[in-house]
Amino acid sequence: MKTYLLAWNPKRWRWHDLAEMSQKVKQGKKVLDRWGTGTSRKVLKGDRFFIIRLGEKPKGIFASGFVTKDSFQGLHWDETKSALGENANYVEIQYDVLLNSESQPILERELLNMPTLSKMHWDVRMSGVQIPNDVASELEIIWSEFVKQNI
């Protein structure tokens, strides 16, 4: 199993049902979603993912889970590009944690500068970047503690 970083930039795409989805995950309900993986087609079913919020504050990790379907292509998430018939790469995912970054604390971007975690370039331009195994292991520990304290 590999671990991937997926990215969300609210300046480029507004997540209108984030609060509702977050609440369902918190209640233990199964929440499936589709997420773009940039140019990567290497993300596979069973892989672990974390989603980082970039572009506007608060910035940081706010979601995690597992990939439920291998990478596939579909119409681009950007309406302008999809209108032109452009495709994008996607995976289907299931959240184990989904924090509402508008109203809940998230694992702040600055905390990702700590030793071990600082080996990863977190300010990615697109989703689907693999997190090195040693960094992913450390992130799992920090994320688990953060979630225990904040949910």
Image: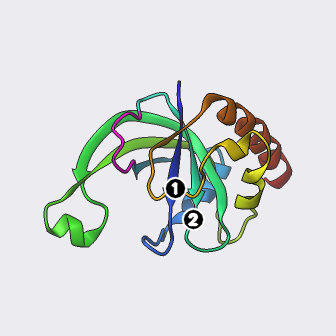
Lower sequence index among marks 1 and 2:
2
Q: Check the image and report above or below for 56 versus 23.
A: below
Give the colouring mode of the picture.
Answer: rainbow
Magenta range is 37-43
Residue pictured at 65% horizontal, 54% vertical: 61
Query: Residue 79: horizontal and vertical position, in percent?
Result: 26, 70
> On the rendered structure, is 147 left or right of 59?
right
**Disc 1 and disc 2: Cα gap in Å?**
8 Å
Q: Check the image and report above or below for 102 versus 109.
A: below
Q: Are marks 1 and 2 in contact (CB under 8 Å)?
A: yes
Amino acid type, residue under disc 1 in the picture: Val
Residue pictured at 59% horizontal, 74% vertical: 56
Residue on which the image places disc 1: 124
Element at label 2: loop
Amino acid type, residue under disc 2 in the picture: Leu
Query: Residue 134: horizontal and vertical position, in percent?
Result: 68, 30
Q: Quadrant of residue 13?
A: bottom left
What's the magenta bit mostly, secondary-structure-wise? loop
Query: Residue 25: horizontal and vertical position, in percent?
Result: 61, 50
Residue furthest to the right in view is 149
Asked whether residue 35 is in view, the answer is yes
Query: Residue 66: horizontal and vertical position, in percent?
Result: 53, 36
Residue pictured at 57% horizontal, 40% vertical: 65
Comparing 19 with 133, the one in front is 133
Residue on which the image places disc 2: 54
Asked whether residue 106 is in view, the answer is no
